Amino acid sequence: MTLRATHELGRSVVVSAGAAELFTYVYRPDTPVLESPKPYLHPIRTRGGALVSLYRPHDHVWHKGIAWSLPHVGEHNFWGGPTYTDGRYVQRDNNGSAVHRELTTLTASGDRVQIGHTLDWSAQGGDPVIEERRSLTATLVDDATWALVFETAMTNVSGATIDFGSPTTKGRENAGYGGLFWRGPRSFTDGVIQSPDGAGGDELRGRRAEWFGFRGRHDESGDRSTVVIVDDAANPQHPPQWFARTENFACLNPAPFFSEEVPLPDGQTLGFRYAVVVADGDRGEHGTASLADHGRNALR
């Protein structure tokens, strides 16, 4: 089986395997400013065609499948919506945008597709904040599994040191979200969060681990799927704390700025790599750990 890439010029790339469209990467979205426009992956599907992402849910319209989303970049909000300030969320004029500049790579060969591009991160008023180089590499693992490696290098061009943080670093307990954020489908609510140390629920939020997974069930078919995210060993703050939820909605987020701000001086670059593994079926505790092994291999 080979992977195919279909390019809608100036907007998105669809990656497919056989009849299944595994994901669409929308690199130039039409997102409202208050949702902090940024590229995202949605829809995301298993090799069997089951949908494992959610786009613009009414409870958090800035959640979009999988996106590199950062709520506190200095004074800027590249997450979307209000900013946590002085003990509450306040809608400010600080919703920045991560805007596609140039597609640098688009290749499809056998079981691999690679997408690369550059982006300009700007404040809501238009001032430059970050220049980013990003790549996404999709590979097939087996008949029921595929993997995506997400890599980013962000260079501070703001003219001053900027601190990357989260609502927790601003005072909100156990709300350290920010980074590579996956929002699962509605039917995954009350599913199983899987850590290397065992399965559980929202009580696992804030734990440090190399990887986390989510085991969920689909409406209509009743089928199950498993999603795993693996943090690269070279990432800052590795192993990260995880922002993971299941009780109100399904999400996974290795959060490098969960409880400690990371400063980035002007002109310096900060890089991260992650593997996302998507599989048909509930793989259970041992099977989910095996998916993490596939993610680890993809990062090599």
Image (cartoon, grey):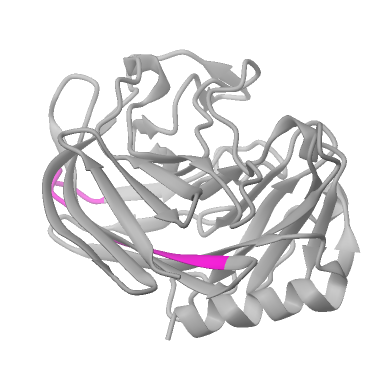
Q: Note whether residue 189 is visible.
A: yes
Q: Is residue 179 magenta?
A: no
Where is residue 81 drawn, in percent x and y? 48, 20
Which quarter of the picture shows residue 184?
A: top right
Q: Nearer the viewer, residue 182 or 290?
A: 290
Q: Does the magenta stretch include residue 158?
A: yes
Q: In which quarter of the image is the N terminus?
A: bottom left
Q: Residue at x 18, y 19 (%)?
A: 125
Which quarter of the picture shows residue 150?
A: bottom left
Q: Vertical placement of 270 versus 36: above or below? A: below
Where is residue 114 drawn, in percent x and y? 28, 64
Magenta span main SS? strand
Where is residue 124 drawn, in percent x and y? 24, 21
Q: Residue at x 42, y 53 (%)?
A: 16
Q: Residue at x 50, y 19 (%)?
A: 82
Q: Note whether residue 259 is visible.
A: no
Task: Say whether residue 111 is left or right of residue 161.
Answer: right
Task: Say whether residue 196 is left or right of residue 34.
Answer: right
Q: Residue at x 33, y 34 (%)?
A: 38
Q: Vertical placement of 234 versus 155: above or below? A: below
Write down the region rendered in magenta. 146-161
